[in-house]
Image (spheres, coloured by chain):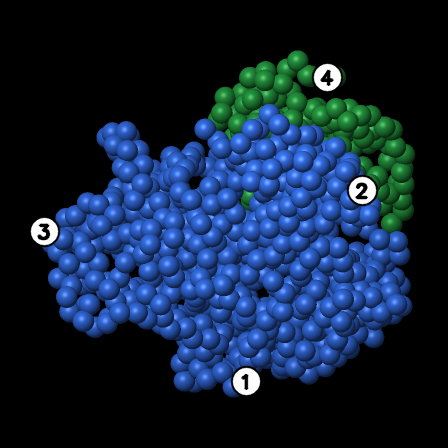
Amino acid sequence: MNKYAVINTHVHNVDGIAKVTGRATYTFDVKLPGMLYGKILRSPHPHAKILNIDASRALKLPGVIGVVTGKDTLGVKQGIWRRYKDLCDEQILPVDKVRYIGEPVAAVAAVTEEIAEQALDLIDVEYEVLPAVFEPLDAIKKDAPEIHEGFERNINVTRHIEWGDVETAFEEADYIREDWFKCGGQAHMCMETRAAVSSYTPEGKLTVYSSTQSPYYMQGLLAGVLGLKEGNIRVISHYVGGGFGGKFELDGAIFCSAVLSMKLFRPVKIVYTREEDFIATKRRTPMYYYVRTGVKKDGTFCAREAKVFTNGGAYTGMGATALYLTGFFHSFPYRWRGYRYDGYRVYTNTLPSTSMRGFGAPQAMFCSEQQIEWIAADLGLDPIEMRRKNGHYPGYEVPGQATIASCGLDQCFDEIQKWIKGKGKLPEGRAIGISACGFMSGGIFNWFDTPYSFSSAVVTINQDGTVELYVGAQEIGQGSNTTMAIICAETLGVKVEDIKVHSGDTDHCPADLGAWGSRQTLMAGNAVKMAAEDAKKQLLEFAQAKMGINIVYDLDIKNRWVHIVARPERGMDYFELVKEALRGKDGQRIVGRGYYTPHRKGMISPAYSYMLQGVEVEIDRETGKIKLIDSLTAHDCGQPINHLGLIGQLEGAFSMAAGYGYLEYMPYEDGKLMNPNLVDYKVIRATEMPEAAVAEIDTYEPEGPYGAKEAGEGLTNPTAAAIGNAIFHALGLQMKECPIRPEMILKALKEKEEKEKEGK
Amino acid sequence: MEKKLLRLTVNGQEYEIYINPKTLLVEVIRDYLGFTGTKRGCDTVSCGACTVIINGMSVKSCSVLAMQAEGAKITTVEGLEDKGKLHPIQKAFLDHGAYQCGFCAPGMLMSAKALLDENPNPTTWEIREGIEGNICRCTGYNSIVRAVEAVAKGNYREEHHE
């Protein structure tokens, strides 16, 4: 039975009616009086010096109001790793040279979008084309072109993680296996493309409507590049059409609209076309993975060594974090006596790569979970039992990195074993692949160098008992407004409909790092819980006095009923109490404050989710086509908070993870993306989506609000490997590159048949 | 280019506007008439965010010129509800969490409505085919399929309105 009144009950999304009636106003829909429309001129070259930009012909076109180039900016090199100046490497309108095809070069504002588009053709840019390099393993060569000054061999960032005595641990192994893998990029492909409306006014204040995962980051980054005070910038993001890790860096739409508006003192709107969104935002980081793993005959894991070269593209973005996290989660969810990871992020003349849902872990798991499956087969061991034997458990310490408080991994193995057994014998051409993983509940790192708490919340109770909840946590579709409302309602003892959530506005909401790294349920949730407890305490002080009860009794509020815990029938109405309490406060509203910053929680995250996924796959031997038949994920996210939201997030993560595994391919030729549209770039459609059921594992995470931890991002991690493992079991193929495409399966089948012939 | 007179009915209201004949229907709906519930997510008639119902058929409104809709009766997402009373499909979407960021929802709802109007008892596969032209990046579609199934099953029937 649910011990909570609101938590984990069936609650409609608090933004739901706005979203199903068309009332929700996205940045895409914003229209301000006197607004101009902006368009961005983009580089056709992967690497070139900008010698001269002449906009005089464009400015003569009737309807064109202004043009800006790098010369109209302060030329600040920005990046989200603000603490590390050499990783702030991107001028969004570059002054001296362009480093990838699609990079902004100039921006036009005109009275219509059509005129702005026409004006782009009238801007004359003189380039000196430079030699370019597109793959990390080419870019690290001695004679490769230099993309950024002072970065030897184009190495942008390196990361080293090590624990235990790796060499000795390898010596203890009976069996060592090594493999090379290649993991592809992936487009975030948010349904709402990058969009912004900026309005600068003579007071020296800038308002920016933007489609972002973190209004606070946008405020901070804009202040840095525009030379304004943070407090003079207001970022508004009430409804955001998807983010998935692609919308918490400064992008061309936000920056160029702001620069145009500051020059012209008019509101300027820029909306990316789908093609621009593909070629000129950022993408999941493509990686080359070398993995060497040593195990004992009985399947005990001894040591692992990994070397990774990532295609960083032209700029750092969030890529430095992805480089670290891929190395950390590559060890998950297992215990290694010795573990060593060396990651190299390499600049190339391609679209910059960055964070995307899973944050480096889907790549790590594609390699790790397939190699583990092959090792089990090599040694003749049960792949589930081998995993179980080496898995994390509650109280385990990842040496020097993290302490695992809650962990339901062991029960996950039981659930998936049961599911596989229940399936019986599968038809010809079908097999089940499994894959385990874990994920973080928010990052501990502060590369943004914020002086604020990581999350903050303010709860205000009005005289009629309605509650204003102010959070900096950002709603991007994942349901955070609803989750925060649920936590607030549960804590205060009221109903969700009593809560009005205010988010997505830096003028009115407290600072918060925003929606990334699965941080909000735990971090913002803790802040909301604390704020609601603060407000509730003030109410109960009045109740205690008013009811005149012995001070040894505890009071609580549940379902709007203020009562003695030991004698729940004795109490008073919540609404009555609020009115009384306000009088006692000289008419002031009740205000509660809460905040959260992780302390003493290791290097990575305060808590970790765990899961094991099984995917049933059918492969057509003639065409190489992959069809997903069914799936189950056994999933430990601690205490579920938002029941409907959780189901939706997990199913949605599966669809994106499966897309990464076998559909979503980003082929480049000479630095040019060959499929920048939704005809040629395939995402999963309704007819391709299998059941994505979830078996919830009951655990309690002590650091999370009401025991909650990550959900919705981690499930992006296992699926590509699970599909690969199903192919291994169906056809005996070891697929070392993702997405796994039909032509790759046909080629591997042919090679396998030829090898078998030779063997005979 | 010379502007042309366009007459059409959107959500029960007749409109007469002068437009450039190259204007797409989605631009008329959003920019001229202000029904911004209808979205756009691509330039290649691939994503379905702009789906509306024209004379009973679901159509991607970026795939037709507005002039082709001369005299047509068009319903957008704003036309589903009746003075605050939600349509059964809207209620089912709420109950099943059949949207997340919500950007695809207006188009998805119109595809689902057109499907159910034509085939009130679709199989699960027919529902999947009926919304195949609409991309949802958030939900993985299964909650949408459950919502449409619930409407087809009659779970919202007593509340049905004209």
Residue furthest to the left in view is A760
Q: If you read the primary sequence from the N terminus, does the residue marked by circle 1 or circle 3 appear first?
A: 1
Q: Which chain is green?
A: B
Is A166 displayed left or right of B127 in the figure? left
Residue pictured at 49% horizontal, 50% vertical: A704
| Residue A328, x across and y down, in percent | 38, 63
* C-alpha gap between disc 3 and disc 4: 72 Å
Element type where label 1 sits in the image: loop
Question: Which residue is tagged 1?
Answer: A149
Question: Which residue is tagged 3?
Answer: A760
* C-alpha gap between disc 1 and disc 2: 66 Å
Question: Which residue is tagged 2?
Answer: A583
| Residue A388, x across and y down, in percent | 25, 48
Q: Nearer the viewer, mark 4 or mark 1?
A: 4
* C-alpha gap between disc 4 and disc 2: 47 Å
**Which disc number belongs to residue B161?**
4
**Chain to which mark 2 belongs:** A
Give the crowd class for mark 2: few <14, some 14-19, many >=20 residues within 10 Å. Answer: few
Is B69 displayed left or right of A667 in the figure? right
Element type where label 4 sits in the image: loop
Whether residue A325 is visible to the viewer of this picture, yes or no, is: yes
Q: Where B128 sits versus A544, above or below?
A: above
- As shown in the figure, which amino acid type bears the numbered disc 3? Lys
Q: Nearer the viewer, mark 1 or mark 3?
A: 1
**Chain to which mark 4 belongs:** B
Q: If you read the primary sequence from the N terminus, does the residue marked by circle 2 or circle 3 appear first?
A: 2
Q: Nearer the viewer, mark 4 or mark 2?
A: 2
- As shown in the figure, which amino acid type bears the numbered disc 1? Glu
Q: Where B158 sits versus A376, above or below?
A: above
